[in-house]
Amino acid sequence: MDEDQIHATLSRMLLAGRLPGGTKLGEHRLADIFGVSRERIRKVLHRLGHERLIEVVKNRGAFTLAPDPSEVHVVFEARRILEGGIAAHLADTLSPDQVETLRAHVDRESEALKTGDRRTWLRLSAEFHFLLAAMTGNPVIVQQARELVGRTTMLVAFYENNAGAQCGCAEHRTIFRALASGERARAGKAMSAHLALIETRLRPLACVDAGPPLEDVIAEFMEPPSPPARTRRKAQMKAEAQA
Ligand SMILES: [Zn+2]
């Protein structure tokens, strides 16, 4: 596995928020898991630190981001400003094709929720926000949105993982309707309100359990080798992991 593949695997895992904050990402352990040298792992960790997906502490090593209530507020505020602006902008600029793409996306969210497919629903609700950012066609916006949404996902992972802490499906539809009808102010407000609601729905966990073993979580996010008997299940896991 080369550095890019290791980086991609760890990024997917971190962005999915599957590890509690402050989990040590030891070089030795990761080198064993990926079967590469510590040198390679160090480079990947450095890059992830630079992208602010992990915290690299001098002389102590790399850790998943730890939750800090003031950070939660600051990140959500940044999202309201950025994504409220994205929504307002898109209300003026969406093409009919983009409106249909969004409609289909919101419909898939509802469908996943209705059929109780929670993992798909969670993936689709995060994708809704990436999709809007991508529709601006502006790579700077896309990069900022990726970072902020990723940080939110990781922060939310520390909080009570109930449906209330996630994106409300009806709220996405409200945003979509404002966008589809080209109502700039309403679209911006609907997005800000949605992000404010997610923030207020967060409830800190009474106690943070120790996370699952690092090896297990990483295995879940690796590209599967696809042996025939398990191909279908793995393909499904892969699709989920790429969210
Ligand atoms: Zn949302």
Image (cartoon, rainbow, N blue to C red):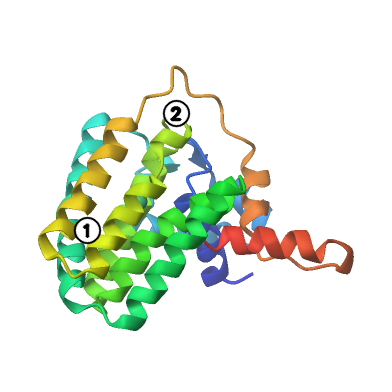
Q: Amino acid at mark 1?
A: Glu
Residue drawn at x 39%, y 75% as measured from the top left: 100
As drawn, is 213 to the left or to the right of 26?
right
As drawn, is 54 to the left or to the right of 109?
left
- Binning the other alpha carbons within 10 Å of mark 2 as few (below 14), some (14 to 19) or many (20 upward) gives some
- Binning the other alpha carbons within 10 Å of mark 1 as few (below 14), some (14 to 19) or many (20 upward) gives many
Quadrant position of residue 37? bottom right
Earlier residue among tags 2 and 1: 1
Residue drawn at x 56%, y 48% as measured from the top left: 114
Using the rendered image of the protein, determine whether residue 35 is visible from the camera's viewpoint.
no
Residue in the foreground of this view, choosing between 41 and 152: 152
Residue that numbered label 2 is attached to = 160
Q: Is residue 118 above or below residue 86?
A: above
Residue in the foreground of this view, choosing between 117 and 115: 115
In percent of width and height, residue 74 lies at 19, 41
- Tell me if label 2 and label 1 are in contact, CB under 8 Å: no
Residue in the foreground of this view, choosing between 26 and 66: 66
| Circle 2 SS class | loop
Residue that numbered label 1 is attached to = 83
